[in-house]
Image (cartoon, rainbow, N blue to C red):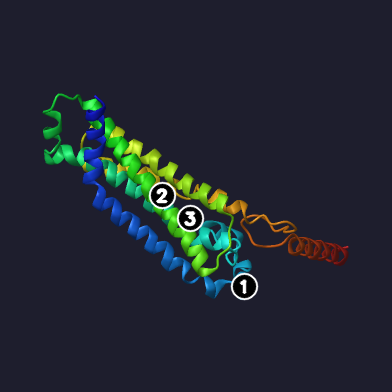
Amino acid sequence: MNAWMLELVGGPLRAMRRATFWWCLGLSALVAVTMSVWPAFKGSSGISQAIDQLPSGVVQAFGLADFGTPPGFLRANLYDFFVPLLIVIAAVVLANGQTAGEEASGRMELYLAQPIDRRSALLGRAVAALLAVVLICLVLGLAQLGSNMAFGLSIDTGYLVSTIALCGLLAVLHGSLAVALAGISGRPSLVLGVGIGVGSPDVSSPRCSLSATCSRPGDTSRPGTGRSAATRSSRQRTCGATRRSRCRRSS
């Protein structure tokens, strides 16, 4: 029985080895290329000042808060949208390829012709897709840590690991949805469309871990805007003085 279970998981893993390799290579290259421009932003106050002049809604929508800091740079360029979305796509594509894709192409019949039930076959392929996503996240984390050391970006490792873990959990959630749909319908187009379509609005949720590193001691800036409390209080005093002067003139 154990040999059967190992084969049910190992077979799909061997079938996914090339796709997993290219996903790992692509995400590592994305991290390395993005991190290569960090030295140009490091210590640049002009960019931070330009972002401070933007409306708060624009800053929050594009994740530009504290863009000149290591957490803000990683969040805006990688972990606010692109990395979570790509990992979700990888999970859904891998799960779909080993479930609905295999059934649609007729290759699933070779497994089901053996003395195993459909639940075991589906479970083995789901576990194989889960292991592939875990491997992708591990390679991504190693690539990020290596790029941090290579390009001099200093950030807390715990926050970085938790952010990548959140991205992985998000991918597992939508990969599980893809497996469930594959077990119900077996249509690859439906599995891909629903799995990726449902996952797209949620990809910005892992930002919270890296956002926590922006709260440095003595920093009173409002999260997500980049404007300091002193600037807001001075504007409030100016507005109050303007209202009082208008009242005097009207009286």
* Numbered disc 1: secondary structure: loop
Q: Choose between 197 and 147: the one closer to the eye.
A: 147
Q: Position of residue 65 (x, y in %)?
A: 59, 60
Residue 44: image location, x then y, percent? 60, 74
Q: Nearer the viewer, residue 21 or 251?
A: 21
Q: Quadrant of residue 73?
A: bottom right
Answer left or right for 104 relative to 228. Answer: left
Q: Is residue 102 above or below residue 236?
A: above
The mark nearer the N terminus, 2 or 3, is 3
Tell me the residue that label 1 is attached to. Answer: 43
Residue at image position (12%, 39%) is: 107
Where's the N terminus, which quadrant?
Answer: top left
User: Earlier along the polypeptide chain: callout 1 or callout 2?
Assistant: 1
The disc placed on residue 137 is 2
> Mark 3 = which residue?
79
Locate the C terminus by quadrant: bottom right
Task: Determine the residue positioned at 47% across, 59% down.
Answer: 144
Q: Is residue 207 above or below residue 107?
A: below
Q: Could you say which quadrant of the image residue 95 lies in?
A: top left
In space, the residues marked 2 and 3 are separated at their CA atoms by 13 Å
